[in-house]
Each structure stands twice: as structure tokens, then as C-alpha cells.
Image (spheres, rainbow, N blue to C red):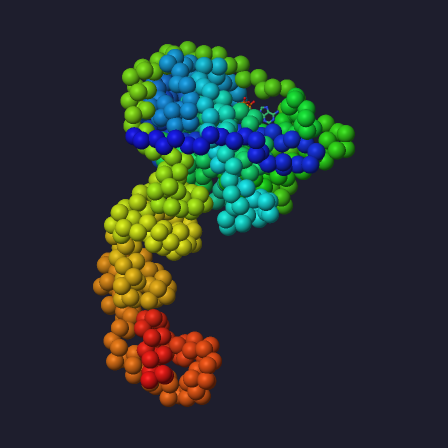
Amino acid sequence: MSMKALPAADNSQTLDWHPRYEVVIGLEVHTHLKLNTKMFCSCAVIYGDDPNLQTCPVCLALPGALPVLNRSAVEYAVRAGLATNHEIQERSVFSRKNYFYPDLPKGYQITQDSLPICLRGHLDVDVPLNKTGKAGKKKAQPDGFYRKNIGITRIHMEEDAGKSVHAESALGSDDSHMDLNRAGVPLLEIVSEPDMRSPAEAAAYLRHLHGILCYIGITHGDMEKGQFRFDANLSLRPKGQQEFGTRTELKNMNSFRYVEMALNAEIKRQAKLLDAGEKVIQATLQYDVDRDEINVMRLKENADEYRYFPEPDLLPLIVDPSLIDKVREALPELPSAKRARFEEAYELSTHDAGLLTSSRALADFYEAATRLHGKAKAVANWILRDVLKVLKEKETDIEALSLSPEQLVELIQLVESSRITAKSAREELFPAMLTEGGKPEALMKSLGLEAVVDTSLIDGVIEEVMGENADSVEKYLNGDDKVLNFLMGKVMQKTQGKANAGAVRETLIRKIKG
Ligand code: ADP
Ligand code: ZN
Ligand code: MG
């Protein structure tokens, strides 16, 4: 693996987010591991299955059932730790976190408390600078980036809880059901230091972390399915004050855009309290997206009392250094290194390189197409403009799109050799390729999209247009160059956009002057 050295982090450029207060944000991220079985039993991890089918005595918490740690989960935790610059602990300990909740049949969650598997990590995150727009009103392209070093306190392994389902039954009553398919699903919790100083930094950190975890293949990261979700802690302190203010916690968010909006709303709320000389009370909050409003869910007067103690049914976890080495060697190139390499190797802007490396599959697609085609710029243009547009419209990713690098390159080459005009390639052939598949050239022919290169045919149309627009021809001869575009438009219309514009222009001028 070759890792490119990245420019050093620059923490001096932190955005001045609020005129009077310094914003302090720390994030707790929960991510589901991309594993076939649960953390402490061999039940399958299946999303959207019928309730309670994926359960056994262990995850149902039947008396006497004993947990057995999923070995792959340990490897994944090590991989996540290394990719986020943590010190992997050779010895860590599972603990019981005791609380009562209907979706937690054991009455406790197995997690790691004071001795987690990864400690003291950090990420260098590129934060987009948006001088003009605040969150929610993003410009398509930021005014640049600054690099920020964000500390990560720890990563620990734990199991997910079940799910309460509040459904109206067939009889019309409001029933609550319990689905324990999710109970015991393997999770990592990644806890950041309170190092972020604006909602933009928080969103950039989350995007970056999500990108890395997906790149290294430890999670599907599907936010809709709750596979990557986060709690955001926020406090304000008067500028210059050392001591942190009281924090509140926005729970269970799963959208980068909404977390930014929520944090902005919470900054406003806290600043208003502090401005009025009131106190911020430690609380759990929820953000109402539709009303752009913060709701207080639960006040926390004291720290929650979970009565943690070491899990007596599991031995301390010992990670062999040889495993750590093995995982380190197998790490793929990480997104920020890939982006930096793309910027340099393919002469792309930071923004474009960021888009092209937003997923590993897209980056691989781009590099495969570039190798086939030879010109990185031409390929980048097509992907950035046309492919990304389709991905966005269809809300899908490149793997799900029926498009191969070979097909895209053939399409580009058809345009370059003037076999098809750029316009029909983009508007007709490309969409058809996505629905019909197959070779672009054959498809172009079968759809009758081939550019008219038969000059005798263009000649005929041009003569026709000249005949019908004698006055314009006259004007052009008298020095009015602009009417040429008008005449060209007429020719393109008659050839239904299939004539090669350069050839039409040339022939038109030759014929008028001749
Ligand atoms: P808990 O589980 O009680 O929320 P954790 O220690 O797991 O506690 O997580 C606390 C999170 O809150 C961390 O991400 C930390 O960086 C952040 N945090 C702690 N103090 C503050 C503060 N004053 N302002 C903002 N965030 C904070
Ligand atoms: Zn089970
Ligand atoms: Mg918390």
C-alpha cells in the first residue's frame, strides 16, 4: 500500500461561527458492521426481515445463554481504529451497561467502558469554506477548504438493542411490538473529542468518517437503515473562556444536512439563553426538521448511572500484535490520500477530486475509464457532469447503475470522432445506454442517432436553407456575421441536431462565399 503524505493540519483557520460565543461540538457515531452474524451469537444480520425471525436464546436473553464474541467484529474494529489513527489496545474489556428499556431484554447492553479496543485517534478533515452561504443554503462549489485536526477519544465495540415498533393493528388499536432482529447486531461507537468549532466542521467530520468506514469495507453505511447514526453534543462558551459550557445532546441523527441544520438551531437556542443571562440545562434534544426547531426530550440533572461492571461471561479481549499488522497491511488507500493523489495525477480541483473519490467504487470506475481512454480530463468531465447527475436523480450509486467504464469510454470516443454530436450523446444516447445497455455504437445506430457526416446530405440541406433565407445570406455577405448562427440553427433543425456543427459551419461559409 502506498500512502501519500498529506499537508499538515491547519487549525488556525477555524471558522468564527458566532460573534460572542465559541461553539464546541463533540460527536458520538454508531456504525453497524458489515457482518453476516451478530456480535455475540450466530444469528444472521438481515435488514427488513419479518420480526423476531433472527433470534436465539442469546439475543433473546434467555436465562443461562452465554455470549461468544464474533471474531470478525474484532478485525473490523482494528481496521476502523487503524484507518482513524488510533492506538489499538492489545487488551480490552467488555462491560455491562445496565438500564431498563423494553427493547433491551437482558436489562443491560454489552459494551466496552473504561478499557475500549481503540484509544487516542484523530482525523485530518478538510472543511469546506462557504463565505457566502450558511448551512442549508449550500453553494454547489465551496470557496475552498481548510484542514482541521479532530481528535477521536475512543472506539469501542458493542451490540445494538432491539426495536420497538409502534403500529396500528388490524383491529385499530395502538399496539406496541418488539422486534429483536436488531438485538445483538454488531456496532462500533466512535467518540470524538469536543474539537469541532462549527456545524460545518461537524458535518465535514461525519462525512469524512463515513467515507473512511465505507472505504475500508467495515460497514454498508446506509444511513436510512440506521447503519451510520450519530449523537451531537454542543455547548457554547464566551470567547476567550477556557472552561467548557454546559452541553446538550442531539440524539440519533442520520443525515449530514440535518445535523448541520440542527446544530445551527441549537446554537441559536443556547445563545439566546446565555444572552438573557440564563443557564443552559444539560438535556437530550430532538430536532424537528420541518419546523427547524429544537425540542427538549429529557433533562439530565446528573450523569446517567449505568452501574458499569466487567462482563463476567466474556474474557478480556486480547488482540495479538500480528493481527494488527495483518490488518494494517491489508488497508486500502483511504479517501483523503486518494483525493490528494487524484488532484495531482489527474489535475483535478480539490472539489472535483472530492466528488470522484466520494465512494471507492466511483473512484475505481473513474480510474478504469481513464486507463482505457487515456485522457483523464475528458473522462472526469463526463462523470462529473452526466454520470453524477444521473446518480443524484436516481438516488443510487455507481455499482447499481448499469454502466461500465468500457461503455462510457466508447461513448466519449464516439463524440470525439464526430460520429455523434455531443448534444445527442448526452441527451439521447447516454440515457438510452442506461436503460438498454449494450454497446453504445450499436445502440447509436439502432436509434438513428449517428451524426450526419454524409456531406452530400449536409450540402443539400444547406442549399435548401440558403434558398429559404436569401435575405440572411445577403446580410452575411454585407458583413453581418451574426446571421451565420441563425442559418446554422436552421440547418441543425432540419438535420435534427445530428449534423456535425463544425462541418456545417465550414460548408455554410464556403457555399455562401462561393
Ligand atoms: P455520554 O455517553 O454521557 O454522552 P460520552 O463521553 O460517551 O458521554 O460522550 C460525550 C461526547 O460529548 C463526546 O463526544 C465529547 O467530545 C462531547 N463533549 C463533552 N463535553 C462537551 C462540551 N462541553 N461541549 C460539547 N461537547 C462535549
Ligand atoms: Zn441470536
Ligand atoms: Mg452521549
Query: Dividing the picture into quarters, in which one does residue 68 lie?
Result: top left
Inspect this view and state whether residue 357 appears: no
Ligand 1, by image quadrant, is top right
Query: Dividing the picture into quarters, in which one does residue 462 lie?
Result: bottom left
Query: Where residue 346 sits: x, y (%)?
Result: 35, 45
Q: Nearer the viewer, residue 435 or 354?
A: 354
- Report the residue that reaches farthest toward the right: 276
Q: Residue at x 34, y 60 (%)?
A: 431
Query: Where residue 337 sits: x, y (%)?
Result: 38, 35
Query: Where residue 72 sits: x, y (%)?
Result: 32, 24
On-image quarter of the C terminus: bottom left
Left or right: 304 in relation to 181: right
Number of marks drawn: 0
Q: Residue at x 37, y 41 (%)?
A: 344
Q: Is residue 194 above or below residue 338?
A: above
Q: Nearer the viewer, residue 328 or 7?
A: 7
Query: Dividing the picture into quarters, in which one does residue 187 lie?
Result: top left
On-image quarter of the N terminus: top left
Q: Residue at x 45, y 35 (%)?
A: 208
Q: Is residue 514 above or below residue 354?
A: below
Q: Residue at x 48, y 17 (%)?
A: 113
Q: Nearer the viewer, residue 243 or 62?
A: 243
Q: Nearer the viewer, residue 95 or 98?
A: 95
Q: Is residue 416 above or below residue 266?
A: below
Query: Where residue 512 sits: x, y (%)?
Result: 36, 83
Inspect this view and state whether residue 514 appears: yes
